[in-house]
Image (cartoon, grey):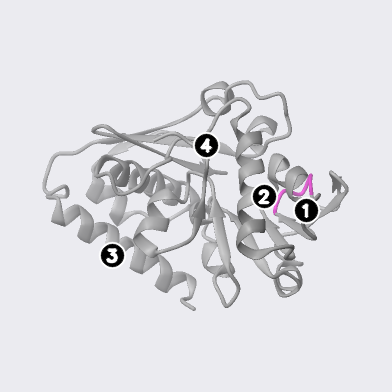
Amino acid sequence: MKNKTEFYQELLHKFTQLAKEHNLLGENITVSGKTLSDEEALGNPERRDYPLLTGKESLMEACFHNGRGQAFTDQPGPFEGSLSHIIDHALESNHSRAVFIAALNAVTSHLKLSDKTIHCRNEEPEACAGELSRCLEEKHGKVKIALVGYQPAMLEKLKDSFPIRVLDLDADKIGTIRYGIEVEHGIEKREEVLQWSDIILCTGSTIANGTLPDYLGEKPVYFFGTTIAGTAELMGLNRLCFKAAS
């Protein structure tokens, strides 16, 4: 298993090589990012306890030629600059990492290497959760699932079919009961919950906050969401995302 430094250096190297192969680093290319409003990101879903709608996370979007890419982050903010500048500063902070990940998703979308890079909207997260539950049961049966990152639609669907424990870093959620399941501390309880589980279902936003390598090991890991789109392609990670747009 790669440590955090090794993982991100490999991802940076692969993305840099990809940009070089397509002569992108030598061009005067601008990648812009913006923080999306709740309505832009999710539309108007009936369920109102998504992290985006409670102000705990923001969704940044990068546009590159005809490609669009997004990244969840706790350090939002606009950015505009060259691809080489983004790569050079990719790991300095959660903000710069989110800019890099959004740009990576936009570029791989432009190059037709990744798809489903735009967050699903309105009631599509509910439909996605249903398909996710069916997919995991077909692949693994009634296994124990560690859900990394509180996602309400997924938790409500999965709890009826699987033994499940939830990890999150939001202090307002830790220790609370959601849909009959306690939300546990994402750092203090991580090793215990991962050891308990048979498979790990992990939010793709872990690539933006720097914790993704903590979940790579011997157990099957599935990442969900748009943030992980380009990284999953370049690094060979399992990704489940059923309703997002390209």
Q: Give me the C-alpha separation between circle 4 and circle 3.
A: 30 Å
- Do the residues bearing badges 3 and 2 touch, measured as CB atoms within 8 Å? no
Counting residues from the start of the chain, the first of labels 4 and 1 encountered is: 1
Going by the image, does 205 lie left or right of 154?
Answer: left
- Considering every residue shown, the one lying at the far front of the view is 138
Q: CA distance from mark 1 to mark 2?
A: 8 Å
**Badges 4 and 1: C-beta atoms under 8 Å apart?**
no
Q: Is residue 186 left or right of residue 241?
A: right
Residue 145 position (above or below residue 82) = below
Tell which of 91 and 63 is nearer to you: 63
Residue 32, x across and y down, in percent: 32, 33
Q: Secondary structure at mark 4?
A: loop
Q: Residue at x 66, y 35 (%)?
A: 126
Q: Which residue is mark 4?
A: 243
Q: Quadrant of the C terminus?
A: top left
Query: Would you name the residue on which mark 2 appears?
Result: 133
Q: Quadrant of residue 62?
A: top left
Magenta span of residues: 169-173
Near-viewer residue (214 or 159): 159
Residue 48 lies, with reference to residue 244, above or below; the image says: above
